[in-house]
Structures are given as structure tokens and as C-alpha cells.
Image (cartoon, grey):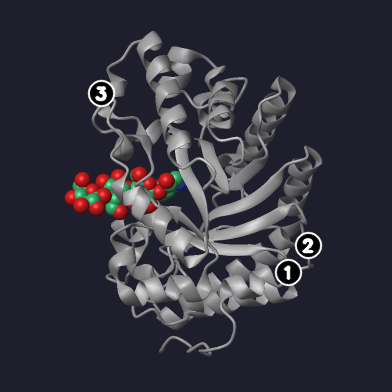
């Protein structure tokens, strides 16, 4: 079956979001922005951009003490020149520690992390709407009572690295909203329920500590074959909102690798989950922003197949994003548009 065509023209996704006081955007790389067709699509559909990897520690400071920010600057300048907001991603993430920093002892890593957070936040001071200050610090499987992931930061610096990162970011950029960002909370599974407990525990600890945390970023890397319960998810979002936090959906895509190869059927299932997820999410008024992790299937990280969960057993290619390889709207685009159109105004 051929994929169902989605109407062209009409308002783009960010225009529909903005009509309700919301925002829509996507992750991007500097190289992708050199594609005129994609750059035009970004301008037509988005109000927010976030660097997919070129603003991370291992990319910015792959040489100690030298900030290689040219690519991230290109994204920031494109956003400024196109009137788009810029998300910062990500100051402290265990998967983006430069090789030279991993060799350091506790004192060395602490000093290097502090210097990096201060330098990166100062580099784009006043230009970042929301920084993902700490990314993915919760891992219930690591068995700690505080649910924290056993990262080099935790092992060498102790849990205080978490509030410290937020205070350093605030000192370097008084204007940016500061977010804790994580994944794996969205579905109605035992693992997601445990993850949500861990994330809530961390948010409460950071608030009690007086850390300048203002936003929870929920990545929303969804899986079309996993259950989703709107009431369960809305209950979690309400608990987060009660802490006085805003909520941003920061990396939305839908992994279809466990669905049959038929393209139209996969596109329909991806769109249906997107619709159900966003209808439940946007009903929570603390939610302000929806960002997809790419616009076109051709750029999705899922296609790299790094995770076994992303690999298909047939030769079909993943279709996790709102636009296909030729930048045509897919049913997922229609689901996002309908969710914004029916969302309560902020
Ligand atoms: O483009 C260069 C290429 O020129 C070079 O030859 C090659 C080998 O070094 O690297 C290429 O860049 C890679 C880039 O992906 C390509 O897009 C980087 O090495 C690689 O590290 C980067 O991976 C990114 C990954 O985070 C690690 O930073 C993915 O793009 C990105 O989608 C992924 O995003 C993460 C979020 O930050 C956090 N949430 C999960 C999400 C998915 O893992």
C-alpha cells in the first residue's frame, strides 16, 4: 500500500502551536542547514531549533580548553536570523564526556566540568531559551536508593554535581530557563513507571536543594509497539507541574521497528500514537513546547540502528518523523497539527 498523502499548504506546525501559546521545533545539525530545501522547511514549520550533537561537551571541547563552537554557532546564527528560539543541548551528559576528561581524577573532572558549563553557557549567554543542563541522570536499573545513574560524574563528584551544574549554568546565563532532560518515562510499562518515580524523586531533591531548575524536558522517544495510557501519563505531568516546573517535549520521534513492513500501516500506527500522546500531553497547561528529534526520516538517529530496539529484521527503513525522505508531510505531521489545533490555549 502507498503511504497516505497529507494535504500540502496551510499553516505549518509552529504557526498552529503558536496560535495556542505553544511552540514547535526540531533538532538539527549545521550540515543539514546547508540543504536549502530543508532550511526552507525548517523556516516554514518550526519556531525552535536545538543542535542534535554539536553543542555537547565531547564535540565542543574535544581539545581541552579549546571551544570548537563553529558548527553550534552556525545553528545559533540561523535561528537568530530566522526568528527561531534556540534550545541548548546538553551541558552535563555522561555520554558526551570528552576522552581527555574521562582520564581525570575527581578533582580534575570537577574542575573540568565546572569550566565547561561556565564556558558553554557564557558562549550563548542571552540566546538560549532553555538549556538542557543535565541529561539522563536517572537509571533505576543501577540499584541506588536515589535512582541515580552510576556515571563518572556521580562516581567521582557525588550527587552534588547535579545542583552544582544548575547553579553554574545560572551564573553564566541569568536568562535561560534551566531543564533536567530524560527519556523512558512515557509508556505504560513497569520500566517507565520506575523511571518516572526516579525522575520525580530527582526533581523534588533539586527543588528542595534550591537549585535553579525551571523545566522538565521529556525526550519522548516513543515506541509504536509499547502501550501508552493517557491518564497515567497525565498524572505524572500533573505531579511535575505541581512542583512549579514547566514541561517541554524535547526529542519526539516514534520507533516503528517492531511493526510490519507495510509503509501505510506503519505511518498510520505512528500517527495514532503521536496523536494519543500529544493530546494527553498538551492537555497539561505546564507543557509549553514540542520538539521532534529531526524533521525528515532521512536524518533520524533511529536509522543508524545503534539500539537493538531500532533494528528491523526486514529491509524496510524506519519512518519515525513527520516528514518523509522527500520532505513530504506524513500522517504523523497531521497528528501533530491536529493535536496543536485541538490543544487548550495557554
Ligand atoms: O557527522 C560526523 C561525521 O562527519 C564523522 O565522520 C563521524 C565520525 O566521528 O561523526 C559524525 O557525527 C556523529 C553524529 O551523531 C552524526 O549525526 C557523532 O559522531 C555522533 O556522536 C552523533 O551522535 C549523536 C548522539 O546523540 C551522541 O551525541 C546523535 O546524532 C544524536 O541523535 C543523539 O541524540 C541523543 C540526545 O542527545 C539525548 N537523547 C538521546 C538521543 C539519541 O541518542
* Element on which disc 3 rests: helix
Residue 230, placed above or below residue 204: below
Cα distance between the residues tagged 1 and 2: 6 Å
- The answer to whether the beta carbon of the residue marked 1 is less than 8 Å from any atom of ligand 1 is no
Q: Earlier in the sequence, mark 3 or mark 2?
A: 3
Going by the image, does 306 lie left or right of 131? Answer: left
Question: Circle 3 sits on which residue?
Answer: 100
Tell me whether circle 3 and circle 1 mark residues in contact (CB < 8 Å).
Answer: no
Where does residue 61 sit, x and y in percent of width and height? Answer: 30, 33
Please indicate, yes or no, whether residue 343 appears anywhere in the rendered image: yes
- Which residue is at a point 48% across and 88% down the rendered structure image? 4
Foreground pick, 54 / 174: 174
User: Tag 2, which secondary structure?
Assistant: loop
Q: In x, y percent, where is residue 297?
A: 38, 69
Q: Which residue is mark 1?
A: 20
Q: Is residue 126 left or right of residue 39?
A: right
Q: Report whether residue 223 is seen.
A: no
Q: Which residue is mark 2?
A: 346
Disc 3 and disc 1: Cα gap in Å? Answer: 46 Å
Between disc 1 and disc 2, whose residue precedes? 1
Amino acid at each position: 500500500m502507498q503511504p497516505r498523502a497529507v494535504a500540502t499548504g496551510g499553516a505549518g506546525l509552529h504557526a498552529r502551536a503558536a496560535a495556542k501559546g505553544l511552540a514547535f521545533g526540531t533538532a538539527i545539525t549545521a550540515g543539514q542547514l546547508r540543504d536549502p530545501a530543508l532550511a526552507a522547511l525548517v523556516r516554514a514549520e518550526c519556531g525552535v531549533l536545538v543542535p542534535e550533537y554539536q553543542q555537547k561537551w565531547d564535540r565542543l571541547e574535544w581539545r581541552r580548553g579549546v571551544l570548537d563552537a563553529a558548527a553550534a554557532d552556525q545553528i545559533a546564527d540561523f535561528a537568530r536570523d530566522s526568528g527561531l528560539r534556540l534550545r541548548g543541548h546538553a551541558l552535563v551528559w555522561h555520554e558526551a564526556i570528552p576522552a581527555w576528561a574521562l582520564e581525570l581524577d575527581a578533582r580534575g573532572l570537577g574542575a573540568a566540568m565546572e569550566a565547561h558549563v561556565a564556558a558553554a553557557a557564557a558562549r550563548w549567554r542571552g540566546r538560549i531559551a532553555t538549556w538542557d543542563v543535565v541529561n539522563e541522570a536517572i537509571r533505576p536499573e543501577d540499584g541506588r536508593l536515589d535512582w541515580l545513574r552510576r556515571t563518572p560524574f556521580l562516581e567521582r563528584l557525588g550527587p552534588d554535581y547535579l545542583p552544582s551544574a544548575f547553579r553554574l549554568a545560572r551564573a553564566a546565563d541569568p536568562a535561560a530557563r534551566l531543564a533536567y532532560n530524560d527519556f523512558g518515562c512515557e509508556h505504560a510499562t513497569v520500566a517507565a513507571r520506575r523511571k518516572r518515580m526516579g525522575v520525580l524523586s530527582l526533581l523534588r531533591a533539586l527543588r528542595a536543594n534550591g537549585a535553579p531548575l525551571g523545566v522538565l524536558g521529556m525526550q519522548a522517544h516513543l515506541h509504536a509497539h509499547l502501550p501508552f495510557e493517557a491518564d497515567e501519563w497525565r498524572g505524572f505531568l500533573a505531579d511535575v507541574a505541581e512542583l512549579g516546573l514547566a514541561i517541554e517535549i524535547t526529542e519526539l520521534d516514534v520507533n516503528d521497528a517492531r511493526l510490519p513492513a507495510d509503509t501505510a500501516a506503519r505511518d498510520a500506527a505512528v500517527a495514532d500514537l503521536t496523536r494519543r500522546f500529544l493530546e494527553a500531553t498538551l492537555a497539561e497547561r505546564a507543557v509549553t513546547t514540542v520538539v521532534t528529534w529531526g524533521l525528515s526520516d532521512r536524518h533520524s538517529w533511529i536509522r543508524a540502528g545503534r539500539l537493538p530496539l531500532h533494528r528491523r529484521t526486514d529491509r524496510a527503513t524506519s519512518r519515525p518523523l513527520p516528514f518523509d525522505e522527500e520532505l513530504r508531510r506524513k500522517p504523523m505531521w497531521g497528528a501533530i497539527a491536529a493535536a496543536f489545533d485541538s490543544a487548550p490555549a495557554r
